[in-house]
């Protein structure tokens, strides 16, 4: 679930993003720097998210990801060989935390067959209508994937391109999902979802990670995110 706009992907920033799958890296909100690269807001308020290998290298997030409660939940859903493909801490800063436009996670984390990716989203703070809670289109997980973000060949100006295009989803179809701190939301890889800009004075922090059922599944070699020798996708079950 890499929510990047094409205009954000200048060569340097796209490399920093594309090589972050086996690292812990920091991604900033739009509009927090001046033309010289100086902060326009306090640095601690400028972060959009941290990703994408918190589950592997940060002891706290590793513990949460592989907790007995989490393993029991995923077993109850019938996963045989779940592997963790990525993790993110999302800040949704007060006053300017950016919107996440409607998308399907499988556009970025594509598998064959489809239906093998699950997002686990944990509210670290209350997520409300005011601070940018998640919105979903009920039933949209049954319609396949309309757009894919893929890696381009080495040497390309930009490291990614898009195949296909998303339909113009009707805004009236989205249902808001406010939750209290501590809630866990399961997100099907093909369900269409979004979140609005946070214009309130409270942040909406969340920890999220994605699982793939590895048994009988092909992880697309065109996905931006790839397992590496340094970090093969680790099993959720310990």
Image: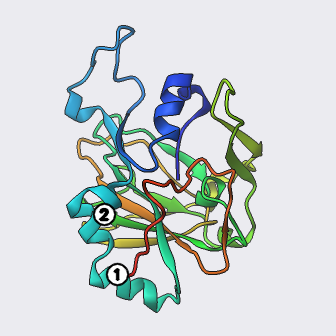
Instruction: Decide: few, some or many residues near mark 2? Use Cα within 10 Å; few <14, some 14-19, many ≥20.
Output: many
Please tell me in which quadrant of the rendered image residue 96 appears: top left
Instruction: Decide: few, some or many residues near mark 1? Use Cα within 10 Å; few <14, some 14-19, many ≥20.
Output: few
Name the N-terminal-most of marks 1 and 2: 2
Residue 88, position in %: x, y?
38, 53
Q: Residue 10: tell me if it is visible.
A: no
Q: Which residue is mark 2?
A: 123
User: Which residue occupies the foreground of this view, 112 or 92?
Assistant: 112
Q: Which residue is mark 1?
A: 238
Residue 200, position in %: x, y?
29, 42
Task: Give the left or right position of residue 77, taking residue 180 as reference.
Answer: right
Please tell me in which quadrant of the rendered image residue 98 appears: top left
Task: Give the left or right position of residue 171, taking residue 33 as reference.
Answer: right
Q: Which structural element holds mark 1?
A: loop
Q: Residue at (42%, 50%) from the top-left corner?
A: 22
Q: Residue at (73%, 51%) from the top-left corner?
A: 147
Residue 74, position in %: x, y?
44, 83
């Amino acid at each position: 679930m890499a929510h990047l706009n094409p205009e954000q992907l200048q060569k340097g920033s796209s490399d920093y993003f594309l090589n972050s799958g086996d690292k812990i890296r920091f991604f900033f909100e739009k509009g927090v720097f001046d033309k010289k690269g100086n902060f326009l807001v306090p640095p601690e308020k400028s972060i959009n998210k941290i990703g994408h290998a918190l589950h592997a290298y940060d002891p706290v997030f590793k513990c949460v990801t592989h907790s007995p409660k989490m393993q029991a939940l995923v077993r109850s859903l019938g996963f045989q060989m779940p592997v963790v493909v990525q993790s993110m801490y999302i800040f949704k800063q007060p006053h300017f935390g950016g919107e996440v436009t409607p998308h399907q996670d499988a556009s970025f984390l594509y598998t064959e067959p489809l239906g093998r990716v699950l997002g686990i989203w944990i509210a670290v703070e209350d997520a409300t209508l005011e601070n940018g809670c998640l919105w979903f289109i009920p039933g949209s997980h049954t319609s396949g994937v309309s757009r894919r973000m893929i890696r381009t060949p080495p040497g390309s100006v930009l490291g990614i391109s898009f195949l296909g295009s998303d339909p113009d989803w009707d805004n009236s179809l989205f249902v808001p999902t406010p939750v209290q701190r501590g809630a866990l939301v399961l997100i099907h890889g093909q369900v269409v979802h979004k979140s609005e800009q946070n214009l309130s004075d409270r942040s909406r922090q969340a920890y999220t990670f994605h699982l793939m059922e590895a048994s009988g599944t092909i992880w697309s070699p065109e996905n931006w995110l790839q397992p590496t020798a340094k970090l093969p996708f680790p099993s959720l079950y310990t």
